[in-house]
């Protein structure tokens, strides 16, 4: 069994680095593989230099990613939270009073948990499982209209709207 301090590369698999520019004995003498004259033959070319053209590292944007300006952000509320309220009718106003959502937030009801009785639920959006659970418990679902005219929020960061 080999021990950790005995490990070594297979003989012949690692060759020493060629030392260029050390005289005419062997390869790499005189111009040392750099050709003759010019900027590339001297040692002043920084890595990534593209001859005065704007380098790739400066052309690529620094911050990655994309922020969709039309994304609609919902605050999720699950069925178990609605069942805990114990109200006959639940809407965004009741959820704000209960501290489950912030004022002005768009509410989406999700299907985690169960409802034991009929509840009338008003929200901006419902998952399919939540809608099925509410109606099967004898309740009703009402979609509240979004506060945007076209059904989605106005674009953020538009140069024309920020004047």
Image (cartoon, grey):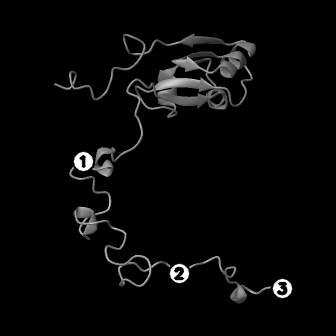
| Closest to the observer, 71 or 63 | 63
Side (left or right) of 65 relative to 123: left
Q: Quadrant of residue 61?
A: top left
Total marks drawn? 3
Q: Nearer the viewer, mark 2 or mark 3?
A: 2
Q: Measuring 24% from the left and 47% from the top, which residue is drawn there?
A: 54
Neighbourhood count class around disc 1 (C-alpha, 10 Å): few under 14, some 14–19, many 20 upward: few
Name the disc covering residue 54, or none: 1
Q: Quadrant of residue 89?
A: top right
Q: Measuring 31% from the left and 27% from the top, which residue is drawn there?
A: 156
Mark yes or no: residue 22 visible.
yes
Q: Earlier in the sequence, mark 2 or mark 3?
A: 3
Asked which secondary structure carries label 1, the reply is loop
Side (left or right) of 162 relative to 142: left
> Can you say whether 161 is above or below 21 in the image?
above
Q: Quadrant of residue 86?
A: top right
> Can you say whether 131 is above or below 63 in the image?
above
Asked which secondary structure carries label 3, the reply is loop
| Closest to the observer, 63 or 141 | 63
State if disc 3 and disc 2 touch (CB < 8 Å): no
Neighbourhood count class around disc 2 (C-alpha, 10 Å): few under 14, some 14–19, many 20 upward: few
Q: Which residue is mark 2?
A: 16
Q: Quadrant of the C terminus?
A: top left
Side (left or right) of 98 relative to 129: left
Q: Nearer the viewer, mark 2 or mark 1?
A: 2
Asked which secondary structure carries label 2, the reply is loop
- Image spot of residue 63 (x, y percent): 36, 45
Name the disc covering residue 44, or none: none
Q: Which residue is mark 3?
A: 1
> Can you say whether 102 is above or below 54 in the image?
above
- Image spot of residue 41 (x, y percent): 27, 67
């Amino acid at each position: 069994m080999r021990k950790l301090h005995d490990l070594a590369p297979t003989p012949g698999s690692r060759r020493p680095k060629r030392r260029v520019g050390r005289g005419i004995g062997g390869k790499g003498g005189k111009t040392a593989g750099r050709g003759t004259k010019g900027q590339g033959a001297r040692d002043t070319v920084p890595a990534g230099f593209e001859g005065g053209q704007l380098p790739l590292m400066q052309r690529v944007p620094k911050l990655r990613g994309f922020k969709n300006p039309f994304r609609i952000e919902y605050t999720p509320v699950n069925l178990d939270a609605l069942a805990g309220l114990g109200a006959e009718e639940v809407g965004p106003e009741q959820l704000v009073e209960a501290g489950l959502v912030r004022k002005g937030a768009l509410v989406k009801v999700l299907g985690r948990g169960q409802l034991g009785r009929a509840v009338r639920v008003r929200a901006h959006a419902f998952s399919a499982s939540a809608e099925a659970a509410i109606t099967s418990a004898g309740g009703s679902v009402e979609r509240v209209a979004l506060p945007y005219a076209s059904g989605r929020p106005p674009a953020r960061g538009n140069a024309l709207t920020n004047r």
